Amino acid sequence: MKFKVGDSVSVLDEDINGVISKIIGETIVIETDDGFDMEFSISEVIKTKKLSSQLFSNNDVSAIINEKETTNKHKSVKVKPKERVLPAMEVDLHIHQITTSNKHMSNYEMLNLQLDTARYKLEFAIKKRVQKVVFIHGVGEGVLKAELDYLFGRYDNVKYYPADYQKYGQGATEVYIYQNVK
């Protein structure tokens, strides 16, 4: 594929878009949409087309918007009984979901971070009156699950049990929070 300076390109396997600012042999320098210059091999990029302003100039945009609004007004959304009982909140406690880098953390530090996150999310759910929370902990060796069981057991207004097996497998615990405990 022939590239030239000024072409709009996207990087394969990355969410990076930009404009070619330099071509040096088999290397292309791209100025990203964020204003950074990044180098990539020619085989790593593809051309993209910019949307031209003429694309929308022939249509009356307000007429299209009004048409969309009038067609969507009278549709009611039916909720299946099974979808009504889905939990309102999910908390993924996998370490890569909580922190960006865990290279220099010991297992003890990672476990404490996961437990602190679980405690914070549970307190948040209690405060915001969320009735059901699913904590996704994974299967593993069961250390995190045992610590979560201990944590949930310290609350009087909480009942916990394994979450829906079809959706989460064995790696999740659902917590039901009683709202009117006196």
Image (cartoon, rainbow, N blue to C red):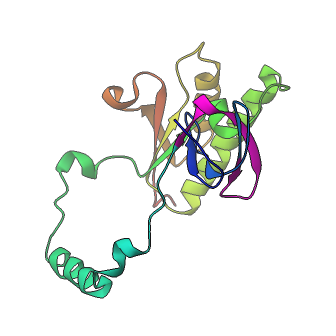
Spot occupied by residue 35 in the image (x, y as percentages of width and height): 74, 58
Residue at 44%, 74% (x, y): give it.
53
In the image, residue 131 sits, relative to residue 91, either above or below, namely: below
Pick the front one: 97 or 55 = 55
In the image, residue 133 sits, relative to residue 76, either above or below, namely: above
Q: Answer whether residue 33 is magenta in the image.
A: yes
Spot occupied by residue 44 in the image (x, y as percentages of width and height): 60, 32
Q: Answer whether residue 9 is magenta in the image.
A: no
Residue at 81%, 25% (x, y): give it.
103
Residue at 36%, 71% (x, y): give it.
55
Identity of the residue furthest to the top in this view: 141
Q: Quadrant of residue 106?
A: top right
Spot occupied by residue 32 in the image (x, y as percentages of width and height): 68, 53
Please state if 130 lies on the left or on the right of 19 as rendered: left
- Numbered label tally: 0
Please state if 123 lies on the left or on the right of 110 as rendered: left
* Range of residues picked out in magenta: 30-46
Please state if 128 lies on the left or on the right of 150 as rendered: left
Spot occupied by residue 39 in the image (x, y as percentages of width and height): 74, 39
Residue at 35%, 75% (x, y): give it.
56
Pick the front one: 20 or 12 = 20
Q: Quadrant of residue 107?
A: top right
In the image, residue 16 sits, relative to residue 52, either above or below, namely: above
Please state if 168 lies on the left or on the right of 27 as rendered: left
